[in-house]
Image (tube, rainbow, N blue to C red):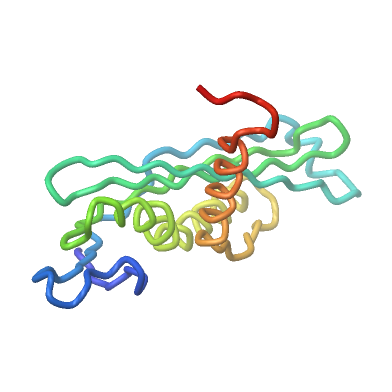
Amino acid sequence: MAESQPATPASAMPQPGDGATAQMSIERIYVKDLSLENPGSPQSFQLTESPQVEVGLRTRAEQVAADVYECVLTLTVTAKTGDRTVFLVEASQAGVFGIRGIAAQQLQPILAIHCPAVLFPYARETIADAVMRAGFPPVHLAPINFEVLYQQQHAQAGVQAAPQPGVPVN
C-alpha cells in the first residue's frame, strides 16, 4: 500500500542542471504507540462542566536505510476539570518515507514540515477515535501549520544562540 506524492517546497527542490529529481514517497503509515487513560470513570461521565483540553506535540525523524526515513508525530491530549484528569490520550503516528534527490542541507525541512503534515490527519483520526472509545465526544484537533512551527523553533534557537551585548564570546 504505497502512495507517492511530491511534498517538497520549491526552496527544497534541486536547482536546474544539477541532474537530480526530488522525490518523496510514502512507504507506510502506522500507529507506533497509543495510550489512553480514563482515570475518573465512571464518575467523569457525570460531569456538568466542560473540561479544559490541552494538546502537546512532538516530532522526530531518523534515517532507517539509504534514502528511507521514519518520522514520528506524537500528539498528547489531556482533558482536565480543575486538578482532575478526565482523560489523557497519547498517539504516536509514524510513517516511513522514501526521500531521494534532496541535498543534505534541505532534508531537515522535509522531515520537520512535510512528513508531519502527511501524518497529522492520521494522528487526528486516531485521537478522535480513542477519545470516543473512552466514552467521550471526539476531540477534533484544528489543523497545524508545521512550517510556521519549524520557523518559530529556528527563530527561538537563533535568539538563544545569539551572543548577548557586552558578553565575551570565546
Does residue 88 lie above or below 12 as drawn?
above
The percent coordinates of residue 148 (x first, y second) are 56, 60
The percent coordinates of residue 21 (x first, y second) are 15, 71
- In the foreground, 163 or 118: 163
The percent coordinates of residue 29 (x first, y second) are 31, 55
Is residue 79 toward the left or the right of residue 62 in the image?
right
Q: Residue at x 71, y 45 (%)?
A: 54
Q: Residue at x 20, y 40 (%)?
A: 64
The percent coordinates of residue 17 (x first, y second) are 12, 76
Q: Residue at x 39, y 45 (%)?
A: 72
- In the foreground, 104 or 62: 104
Is residue 40 toward the left or the right of residue 81 in the image?
left
- In the foreground, 157 or 144: 157
Q: Residue at x 84, y 30 (%)?
A: 83
User: Residue lying farthest bottom?
Assistant: 16
Quarter-wise, where is residue 38 in the image? top right
Number of numbered labels in the structure image: 0
Is residue 44 toward the left or the right of residue 66 in the image?
right
